[in-house]
Image (cartoon, grey):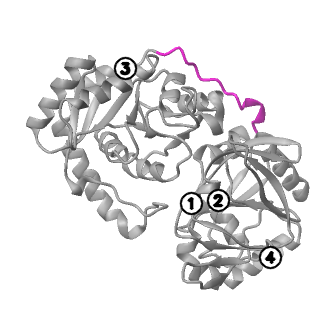
């Protein structure tokens, strides 16, 4: 097969820009993203027209990562890394990092390095990444933000002379090529035209400066990996169950593999919009994913017909699951940075408040315990709990450093909290919820 991991020496080096450029230059690309991120996959999908899938060793396990990668592989697979090549959970080399993932999938790495402020020392940087873990196959280098072809040729000579790793090209330093985003980064309708233009510009520029013939030779992979349907026993296990999925501008953070797994289990997915719809769909369970409801508070708060319908669904025993932005919507309401409060679903006895910065003490991977079931999750939010009521909290979360806290508010058949769950490592929790929804359906 043909495929590679595009990794960076650090965060902010331009991996997403280079990824978009490369994805636009190939046809029939299967895009992937290392880690739990929802933002970059939306750019991948925009460029390739294909869904982008997360590959996260912590949240999915090795079997889950291999399953997703092999299931969705097309003519060429491009996997965008996360942070720096070796950055992960702790300092072990088996730390769920981009490098760790490249070894699990036996994929070559194309390393993106920054040209700004560099001369011969760039070779020492690349050599360090090569030597830290000899099991990682750094097959080539792309240099980003290069001011001239003359500079590229000098940097290329230094890298190839001292590391024996070939340079396959560069992307020039040009502010118009960069990808900007909000802190949650979703694409909006009024931004699409600009992205179309940027996509064509990136495609044009990278074709001028990258040797694609050399690149394609480096990314031909001989692999012993074979597709194994590790979820075969779940086929149609919940045939007939209907789940409503909140999908609009406020709620769109869903792992594609989560939705596909539900379909594989026989679940019928019905999309709805808390912004536009007057009532909830006729389903057994409502799934409110993440997103950024704080940007649509006027519309969400004023849609009283939908909120009344949602409360009726809840009172009548319907199952509801919400995470992060969905949890915030299901609470009493959200207080903005300027202290204005917007009442929302009011199904959870707490409210949330925007903080304007990443809630760092809760950020990152966590182990989850629910009843006697264990799973894994990820938290990333720019808000916090403002007022806490008496509703039971059923998720016990624990970080690697030993910190623990409770989340996952429960009210009748509703469970919602900040953690994002990937179902691959939370199958027992998912099945427990689906069985409850099916009993309600029967």
| SS type, badge 2 | loop
Tag 3 residue: 220
Q: Nearer the viewer, residue 366 or 41?
A: 366
Mark 4 touches mark 3? (CB < 8 Å): no
Disc sitting over residue 252 in the figure: 1
Tag 2 residue: 289
Cα distance in 3D space between marks 4 and 2: 18 Å
Tag 4 residue: 311
Mark 3 touches mark 1? (CB < 8 Å): no
Mark 2 touches mark 1? (CB < 8 Å): yes
Neighbours of disc 4 within 10 Å: few (<14), some (14-19), many (20+):
some
Percent x, y of residue 231? 71, 32
Please state if 262 lies on the left or on the right of 2 as rendered.
right
Is 251 situated above or below 127? below
Disc sitting over residue 412 in the figure: none
The residue depicted at 82 percent of the width and 51 percent of the height is 433
Question: From which residue to which does the magenta span run?
Answer: 223-236
| SS type, badge 3 | loop
The kind of secondary structure the magenta stretch mainly shows is loop
């Amino acid at each position: 097969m043909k495929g590679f991991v595009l990794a960076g020496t650090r965060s902010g080096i331009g991996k997403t820009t280079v990824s978009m450029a490369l994805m636009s230059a190939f046809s029939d690309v299967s895009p992937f993203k290392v880690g739990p991120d929802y933002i970059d996959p939306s750019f991948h999908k925009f460029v390739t027209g294909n869904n982008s899938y997360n590959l996260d060793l912590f949240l999915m396990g090795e079997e889950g990562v291999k399953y997703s990668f092999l299931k969705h592989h097309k003519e060429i697979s491009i996997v965008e890394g996360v942070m720096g090549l070796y950055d992960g959970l702790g300092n072990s080399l088996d730390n769920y990092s981009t490098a760790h993932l490249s070894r699990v999938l036996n994929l070559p790495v194309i390393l993106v390095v920054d040209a700004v402020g560099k001369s011969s020392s760039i070779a020492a940087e690349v050599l360090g990444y090569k030597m830290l873990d000899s099991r990682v196959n750094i097959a080539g280098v792309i240099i980003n933000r290069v001011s001239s072809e003359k500079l590229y040729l000098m940097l290329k000579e230094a890298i190839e002379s001292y590391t024996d790793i070939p340079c396959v090209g560069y992307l020039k330093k040009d502010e118009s090529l960069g990808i900007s985003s909000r802190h949650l980064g979703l694409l909006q309708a009024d931004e699409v035209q600009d992205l179309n233009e940027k996509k064509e510009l990136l495609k044009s520029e990278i074709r001028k400066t990258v040797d694609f013939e050399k690149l394609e030779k480096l990314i031909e992979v001989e692999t012993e990996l074979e597709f194994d349907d590790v979820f075969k026993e779940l086929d149609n296990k919940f045939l007939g169950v209907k789940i409503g999925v909140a999908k609009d501008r406020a709620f769109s953070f869903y792992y594609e593999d989560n939705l596909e797994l539900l379909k594989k289990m026989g679940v019928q997915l019905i999309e709805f919009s808390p912004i536009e719809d007057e009532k909830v769909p006729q389903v057994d369970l409502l799934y409110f994913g993440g997103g950024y409801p704080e940007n649509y508070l006027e519309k969400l708060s004023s849609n009283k017909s939908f909120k009344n319908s949602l409360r009726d669904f809840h009172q009548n025993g319907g199952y509801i699951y919400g995470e992060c932005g969905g949890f915030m919507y299901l609470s009493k309401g959200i207080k903005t940075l300027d202290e204005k409060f917007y009442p929302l679903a009011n199904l959870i006895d707490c409210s949330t408040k925007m903080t304007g910065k990443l809630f760092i003490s809760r950020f990152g991977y966590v182990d989850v315990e629910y009843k006697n079931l264990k799973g894994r999750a990820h938290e990333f939010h720019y808000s916090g709990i403002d007022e806490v009521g008496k509703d039971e909290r059923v998720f016990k979360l624990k970080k690697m450093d030993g910190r623990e806290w409770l989340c996952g508010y429960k009210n009748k058949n509703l469970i919602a909290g900040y953690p994002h769950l990937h179902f691959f490592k939370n199958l027992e929790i998912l099945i427990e919820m689906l069985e409850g929804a099916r009993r309600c359906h029967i």
